[in-house]
Image: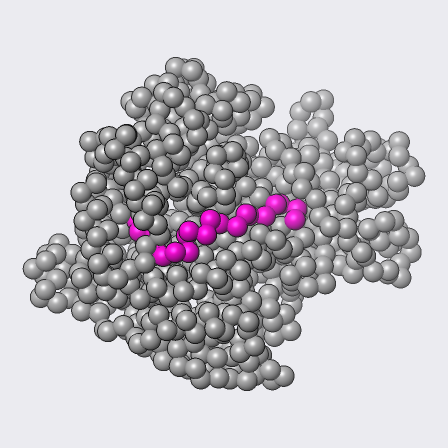
């Protein structure tokens, strides 16, 4: 394994159980043909000859790769139940050797046949010195060769339990009833069976599925109040389709698998223990709460013109994010960044001018952000240096750089297993005299985009660490990219840098500073549009990553999908009640409505930015709770209302911190919303109407939801009531209705007018919804 987790948990006090034998954190009951093992009150392992817990097999896999999209298939040649077992106690130390430094409390040896002498698999139950439990699974090799490359571990489940996590999941917040492959990839376009998904798949092989995600993470939490994390780099599957079994399917190397778990008596305690294991995110820099971060591009003249228009509209602005600081290229997808990672002095300013300009803006309270990823475009100066020094992943056939097609341009990918390459690339963000320095030039942070999702599975990929290959490094690459950025933050940022990224895997929560939800469609569709970012944020939170946000308005504009004024404002009003309020022009800026498209839109955006800034003390508070205790900023309702049954089913409402309930509007043209209120004393933020449901059951209520006033409720006894009322005061009346396809827009932006006409045809004639 390329990395090891060394974070620890607080000591767990386990409640005594009436069982046959007890050893430290584990208790077990043993019969001649069955064994059951518990941690605290939770049964974590159950095996019998009739209902086996372990299977091994042999399989072959196929990874069809197309620009970050993977179609994975396999053929299983053999699958064998390991029904026979033998329990080995700690007193039989010679039977199992363990050099981990942890106590090996229980060891269960599994055999294919009743009279076998050599175990096929060994499952060791260990208690760490800090109280966290670990299951160590290994299938020993045979004469240096792997006997099996598939393993199915079946943990006890329950028909009435809810499961959450799995990294960033956009379609199903409750994982129960579905299977989730853990493989980093593009989230895909469409994701659910729709016309958009069909066309995206037909045209570019880019259709997604309910489980496709940039940030898979083999971590889940149960409503029975325990967590499970699987430390396995290769492709694996969390399969929850059987209501009584939580199955973990592991591929490839099975010689050293660690499964960590812990229990708790409440959701807050459980998340504290989970995030204590991974490590927590530091508090973001306070300046991000001073207003919106404007995603602008097009060169210095365009950026300053757009900034001034939005500022004149009355917006509070904390930063300007210029992702095209290194230049631009145009592909069939649209405008994209030139991945040279050196300032384009023709497009923007010369390096000395840029530094002076950014210092001036910073003095006025406006920061500048840039963009970078771990892939370098062929032909650039940086590529030439990396190629000559062998710093990129190599092609085993030629010995030169392995080139990856990123969509009409090719790149080398930094080999993070090479210490020299790792150190070299990190200097791109910190201190390298040969290339422009993002920190030195004055950038206050950047989008750290991509990760391993674009690395194909290929026998021709060769890493500096010869023990690694394209299958073992694909997922881990995203973790190492996050680790590098975290080191830059720790070494250079002084707590003031804002770095956000979309990709992750195991260990990423302890290294990532801020996540963002990736590339949603510019629509309201629940599979891949605005609504999908809510289960995405909450599933990340239940996986240990408590800081997340999304692009206002979405990103993907294809196949007549273009955003209108209403979608842009609805998305903006939702993001008022998240940690970050950041716009994005999307992949085809001129076909889509922007904050600066008309003066009226800029003026409508202004009150929302003021509301966001008014909420600053509360923003800081919920970020501190996440940093100190691991309690995510965007939380599911049950995190606070664990005894309310309905709260476990809700995935499109969320608690922002402990005292705000948010229910965004996802239906175009809707001006009312039905909202579920859990048992508590609630006040509607905009009208002041109250519902005292404390001591009662939850209730569905209907409220007005005009533009600019999404359904938001606060707890009446909240110590932050005065802050919430100031938010209301910053936006005392709803926004006027959007102008839609006005003649003014026709003359000012005929191209956008044309695409909005096509959108109406596509959405309403072809029944996209």
Res. 460 image quadrant: top left
Between 611 and 214, the one lying in front of the other is 611
Horizontally, is 602 left or right of 215 in the view? left
Q: At x 44% / y 79%, what residue is drawn?
A: 684
Q: Is residue 110 above or below residue 742?
A: above
Horizontally, is 310 left or right of 461 in the view? left
Q: At x 33% / y 45%, what residue is drawn?
A: 363
The percent position of residue 563, horizontal first and vertical second, equals 25, 59
Between 413 and 358, the one lying in front of the other is 358
Q: At x 82% / y 31%, what residue is drawn?
A: 97
Q: Is residue 415 above or below residue 760?
A: above
Horizontally, is 247 left or right of 130 in the view? left
The percent position of residue 387, horizontal first and vertical second, equals 38, 18
Count up the numbered dots.
Answer: 0
Quick check: can you spot residue 609? yes
The magenta region covers 276-295
The percent position of residue 379, horizontal first and vertical second, equals 29, 22
The percent position of residue 597, horizontal first and vertical second, equals 19, 57
Between 12 and 667, the one lying in front of the other is 12
């Amino acid at each position: 394994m390329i990395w090891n987790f060394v974070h620890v948990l607080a000591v767990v006090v386990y409640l005594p159980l009436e069982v046959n034998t007890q050893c430290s954190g584990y208790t077990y009951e043993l019969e001649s043909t069955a064994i059951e093992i518990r941690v605290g009150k939770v049964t974590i392992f159950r095996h019998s000859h009739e209902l086996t817990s372990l299977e091994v097999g042999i399989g072959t896999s196929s990874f069809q790769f197309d620009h970050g999209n993977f179609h994975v298939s396999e053929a299983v040649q053999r699958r064998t139940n390991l029904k026979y077992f033998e329990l080995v106690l700690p007193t039989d130390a010679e039977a199992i050797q363990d050099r981990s430094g942890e106590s090996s409390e229980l060891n269960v040896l599994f055999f294919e046949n009743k009279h076998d002498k050599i175990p096929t698999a060994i499952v060791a139950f260990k208690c760490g010195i800090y109280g966290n439990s670990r299951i160590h699974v290994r299938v020993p090799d045979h004469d240096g060769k792997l006997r099996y490359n598939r393993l199915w571990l079946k943990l006890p489940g329950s028909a009435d339990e809810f499961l959450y996590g799995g990294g960033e999941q956009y379609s199903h917040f409750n994982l129960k009833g579905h299977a989730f492959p853990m493989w980093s990839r593009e989230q895909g376009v469409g994701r659910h069976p729709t016309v958009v998904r069909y066309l995206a798949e037909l045209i570019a092989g880019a259709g997604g599925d309910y489980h496709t995600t940039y940030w898979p993470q083999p971590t889940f939490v149960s409503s029975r109040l325990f967590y499970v994390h699987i430390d396995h780099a290769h492709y694996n599957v969390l399969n929850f389709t059987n209501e009584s079994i939580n199955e973990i399917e592991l591929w490839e190397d099975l010689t050293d698998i660690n499964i960590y778990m812990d229990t708790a008596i409440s959701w807050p305690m459980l998340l504290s223990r989970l995030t204590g294991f991974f490590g927590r995110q530091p508090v973001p820099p306070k300046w991000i709460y001073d207003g919106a971060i404007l995603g602008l591009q097009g060169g210095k003249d365009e950026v300053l013109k757009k900034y001034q228009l939005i500022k004149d509209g009355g917006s509070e602005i904390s930063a300007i994010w210029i992702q095209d600081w290194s230049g631009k290229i145009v592909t069939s997808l649209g405008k994209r960044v030139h991945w040279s990672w050196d300032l384009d002095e023709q497009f923007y300013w010369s390096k000395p001018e840029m530094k002076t300009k950014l210092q001036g803006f910073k003095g006025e309270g406006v920061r500048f952000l840039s963009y970078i990823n771990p892939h370098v475009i062929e032909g650039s100066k940086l590529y030439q240096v990396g190629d000559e020094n062998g710093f990129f992943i190599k092609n085993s056939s030629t010995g030169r750089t392995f080139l990856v097609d990123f969509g009409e341009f090719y790149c080398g990918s930094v080999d993070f297993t090479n210490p020299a390459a790792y150190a070299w690339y990190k200097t791109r963000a910190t201190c390298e005299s040969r290339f422009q320095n993002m920190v030195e030039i004055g950038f206050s942070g950047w989008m750290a985009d991509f990760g391993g999702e674009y690395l194909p599975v290929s026998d021709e990929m060769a890493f500096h660490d010869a023990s690694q290959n394209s299958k073992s490094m694909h997922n881990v690459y995203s973790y190492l990219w996050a680790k590098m950025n975290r080191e830059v933050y720790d070494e250079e940022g002084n707590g003031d840098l804002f770095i956000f990224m979309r990709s992750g895997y195991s260990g990423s929560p302890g290294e990532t500073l801020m996540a963002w939800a990736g590339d949603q469609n510019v629509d309201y569709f629940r599979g891949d549009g605005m609504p999908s970012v809510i289960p995405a944020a909450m599933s990340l939170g239940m996986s240990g990553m408590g800081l997340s946000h999304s692009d206002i308005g979405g990103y993907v504009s294809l196949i007549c999908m273009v955003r209108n004024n209403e979608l842009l404002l609805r998305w903006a009003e939702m993001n008022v009640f998240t940690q970050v309020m950041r716009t994005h022009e999307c992949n085809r800026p001129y076909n889509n409505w922007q904050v600066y498209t008309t003066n009226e839109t800029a003026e409508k955006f202004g009150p929302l930015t003021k509301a966001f800034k008014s909420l600053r003390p509360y923003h800081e508070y919920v970020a501190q709770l996440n940093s100190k205790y691991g309690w995510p900023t965007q939380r599911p309702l049950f995190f606070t209302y664990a005894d309310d049954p309905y709260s476990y089913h809700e995935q499109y409402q969320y608690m922002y911190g402990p005292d705000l309930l948010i229910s965004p509007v996802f239906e175009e043209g809707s001006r009312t919303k039905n909202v579920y209120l859990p048992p508590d004393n609630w006040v509607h933020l905009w009208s002041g109407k109250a519902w005292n449901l404390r001591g009662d059951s939850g209730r569905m209520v209907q409220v007005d939801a005009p533009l600019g006033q999404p359904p938001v409720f606060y707890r009446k006894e909240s110590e932050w009531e005065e802050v919430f009322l100031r938010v209301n005061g910053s936006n005392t009346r709803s926004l006027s209705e959007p102008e839609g396809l006005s003649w003014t827009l026709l003359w000012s932006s005929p191209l956008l007018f044309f695409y909005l006409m096509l959108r109406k045809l596509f959405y309403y004639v072809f029944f996209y919804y």
